[in-house]
Amino acid sequence: MPSSSGSTPLSRPPEIETILTTLSRYNPETTTVLQEYVVTQCATGSYDLMANLALLKLYQFNPELMRDETVLNILAKSLTVFPEPDFTLALHLLPPSLLHQYSSASTPNSTIPLPPAADTDDQLSNSVHRLTYLNSLLELAAFPAFWRIVSSDVDEEYADLVADVTGFEDAIRRGITKSVTVSMRSFKLESGLSWWNFTNKEAVEQWVEAEMPGWVIEGESIVRKDEEDTTTAATSAVQPATGKIKFEQFSRVIRRVYENELLHH
């Protein structure tokens, strides 16, 4: 399962760790190793944000070494850890010439970007544009629209852009699950069908059982039944905040800042 943003994955090979923690991260000769590592991530389902960002940083200073396929695979892999902001972090390391703005269409409940048109002759730019559109749909919680676009026969390039990423669909489903479960205590089973792109209720039942501990299906609804969570919520409702923050809560922030400093210096 992919590691969270900025953390050190257990699957990171020693040679990659050496590159990221020494001056080798600035050596153009390491691009080949890092590119091969991206291929490995796509094939095995592993994920290493810091290694991928380090490679994009090398591309910034050595544009002649940039490989289109690798850039697109990094962006596609970044989608698989939604709702983490990894896609945006990777996108901001790309040349401005590859980035586009696109129009939006307002609906009663949300603003959904219109599908991008191939408005340039640059294939890489147009592919980045398509992946950015997919990321926008996820961020806007337009999950059914996301699945329709990815599986569309009208523009097969969307499917082609994520084809190298093993386990892409289930990874997206896990991200959607995470996004939904932190904001809801129940939702309709029918919603789960469209959000996760399943075709039958049996698939939803299997997903809830395997991927959503503490949740159960009751009739036509999916409901949180985690007793510990319920107790915690009730306690929080009757007890005022103490204003105390444990030191451990700062550890992840401190580590993230340190890793970002390593990346940008």
Image (cartoon, rainbow, N blue to C red):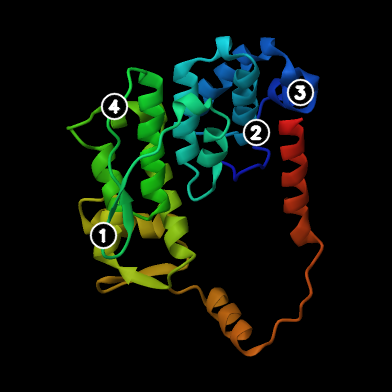
Identify the residue at horizontal 27%, vertical 49% (top origin).
Answer: 145
Q: Amino acid at mark 1?
A: Thr
N-terminal-most mark, 1 or 3: 3
Residue identifier under label 1:
107
User: Looking at the image, which is closer to me, 199 or 136?
Assistant: 136
Q: In the visual, does 110 lie left or right of 57?
A: left
Q: Residue furthest left?
A: 154
Q: Amino acid at mark 3?
A: Thr
Q: CB atoms at circles 1 and 3 under 8 Å apart?
A: no
Q: Which label number is shown at residue 50?
A: 2
N-terminal-most mark, 2 or 1: 2
Q: How many marks?
A: 4
Residue 175 visible to the viewer: yes
Q: What is the spatial separation of the Cα atoms under label 1 and label 3, in whole angstroms?
A: 49 Å
Q: Quadrant of residue 234?
A: bottom right
| Mark 2 crowdedness (10 Å alpha carbons): few <14, some 14-19, many ≥20 | many
